Image (cartoon, helix red, strand yellow):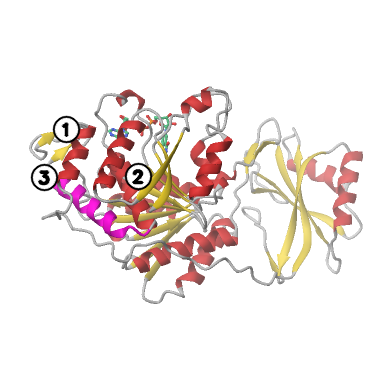
Amino acid sequence: MTRITVAKGDGIGPEIMDATLKIILAAGAKIEMDFIEVGEKVYLAGNTAGIAPEAWDIIRRNKVFLKAPITTPQGGGYKSLNVTTRKFLGLYANVRPCVSLHPFVSTKHPQMDVVIVRENEEDLYAGIEHQQTNEVVQCLKLISRPGCEKIVRYAFEYAKQQGRKKVTCFTKDNIMKQTDGLFHQVFDEIAKEYPNIENEHWIIDIGAAKMADTPEAFDVIVMPNLYGDVLSDVAAQIAGSVGLAGSANIGEECAMFEAIHGSAPRRAGQNLANPSGLLQGAIMMLNHIGQTDVAEKVQNAWLTTIEEGIHTYDIYKEGVSKQKVGTSQFADAVIANLGKTPKILKAVSYANSATLHLPAYQRKAPAEKTLVGVDVFVDWQGTDPNTLAEMLKKIQLNGVELTMITNRGIKVWPNGFKETFCTDHWRCRFKPTAGNSFNKENIIQLLQNAVQQKIDVIKTENLYAFNGKDAYSLGQGQ
Ligand code: NAD
């Protein structure tokens, strides 16, 4: 018996959760449940997190959380509970299988069987944003080695366990050489440990186009958070419907399982919604807690029901479907099919699908880190970079000089193009002259000089070399 936490959520949530629980209990799931309240009611009661502290205690105690979709009220200060849950509980891997159910559910991609493994904790979702000048705001993209290692290893271990042939990595490391570059580098390192699984890397733009056009070319695809957010919805939609896909959010201690769609408020309370997405989440949960026989039984009964043409309104199609049913009738049809296996769709076997246990991250010996310069970011309303360079030369130190100015990453001094559009946000790079070294005192001195010269410094970014290799971006055009 495993004790799990259940949240029925908002909108169609309670109906699809009731249907899902009825099916898995009928199939013999050995679970005890603690029900918690999350979402709209909690938000509107004044809790901007959408969840009460006592509910966290229950989630953390049980470690396994089955969650129906919730409604995030529009406007003012409400934080997405999904993002908060993933980060608080360290749910670093988001796993979304997207399989087409051709010919029973319309799709342009009858052969599609892709699993998206999305990094879930970092990247632009760190939510660190600042306005720095009148015209410029920034969002920090943070990518960490442990974050990359955990997600990439998870993708390969998942592929190995599920007998999948290939893991593909999507990044934009031709542009983001440090952040996406690290993700790609770690992918290459870890891929070597799995010689029996094919590996490849695609630049995200053409990779996404290929996935939307020829998804059968892919098997497991691993990617950083933002790309994964976008592409996992695309993958689910082109497989047939976002209403059919579930997702697992996996951490070292805890895990959360859900449908990928939202609370569809307009469909609520009418016994219309398709419970399949949440049921898919629940099946992943059953595998996760080691009840693989029950998971397999439910999945094969569900495939049989889809194959019999018993469909909810969202996938019902004249000529293909046989019977249009509501949420609870669909659940009853799946229950009636428990023990059956599909005839045309591929029956599943989950013999090897229990929890993946990954080795803990091992921190490597630190590289030798040397300070080699500083980027001083300046808010300046002028337009001619040569004027700014003259001002900045007045703050130079003995042995430390201005080497470059960029505007939105494009080099505008020295030898800029007058055609380059400049905003009020300037990156001014100071480096030691030949034969000199650089230290933190130099930065303090530069900033003091800038204050005296009335130069509006908005931030600095230290330039480092690790083991003698420069670890910062060049200016575009440098
Ligand atoms: P949605 O996914 O709720 O609905 C999009 C469309 O899909 C609607 O036409 C809806 O009727 C249909 N649909 C969705 N699930 C269905 C199902 N199971 N059966 C049949 N049809 C289904 O997206 P939305 O309308 O953008 O968002 C509604 C609310 O859900 C918002 O408050 C949003 O913040 C929230 N949301 C929650 C989650 C979550 O809790 N994980 C995820 C996404 C959106």
Q: Earlier in the sequence, mark 2 or mark 3?
A: 2
Q: Is mark 3 within 8 Å of ligand 1?
A: no
Q: Residue at x 28, y 46 (%)?
A: 25
> Which disc is residue 234 wearing?
2
Which amino acid, mark 3?
Answer: Glu
Mark 3 lies on residue: 308
Q: Quadrant of residue 135?
A: top right
Q: Is residue 385 magenta?
A: no
Q: Nearer the viewer, mark 2 or mark 3?
A: 3
Q: Report how far apart the C-alphas of labels 2 and 1 lie in the structure.
A: 26 Å
Which amino acid, mark 1?
Answer: Val
- Considering the numbered disc 2 on the image, is that residue within a helix, a strand or a loop? helix
Which region is colored magenta?
Answer: 290-307
- Considering the numbered disc 3 on the image, is that residue within a helix, a strand or a loop? loop
Which amino acid, mark 2?
Answer: Val
Up the image or down, 77 lies above or below 89; here it is above
- Where's ligand 1: which quadrant? top left
Q: Earlier in the sequence, mark 2 or mark 1?
A: 2
Asked whether, in this view, residue 293 is left or right of residue 398, the answer is: left
Asked whether, in this view, residue 39 is left or right of residue 32, the answer is: right
Expressed as whole percent of the image width and height from the top left, the position of residue 342 reads: 14, 54
Q: Residue at x 12, y 41 (%)?
A: 309
- Considering the numbered disc 1 on the image, is that residue within a helix, a strand or a loop? loop
Q: Earlier in the sequence, mark 1 or mark 3?
A: 3
> How many numbered dots are placed on residues in this image?
3
Mark 1 lies on residue: 325
* Circle 3 crowding by C-alpha within 10 Å: few under 14, some 14–19, many from 20: some
Expressed as whole percent of the image width and height from the top left, the position of residue 103 reads: 14, 48
Q: Is residue 299 magenta?
A: yes
* Circle 1 crowding by C-alpha within 10 Å: few under 14, some 14–19, many from 20: some
> Which disc is residue 208 wearing?
none
Answer yes or no: is residue 334 visible: yes
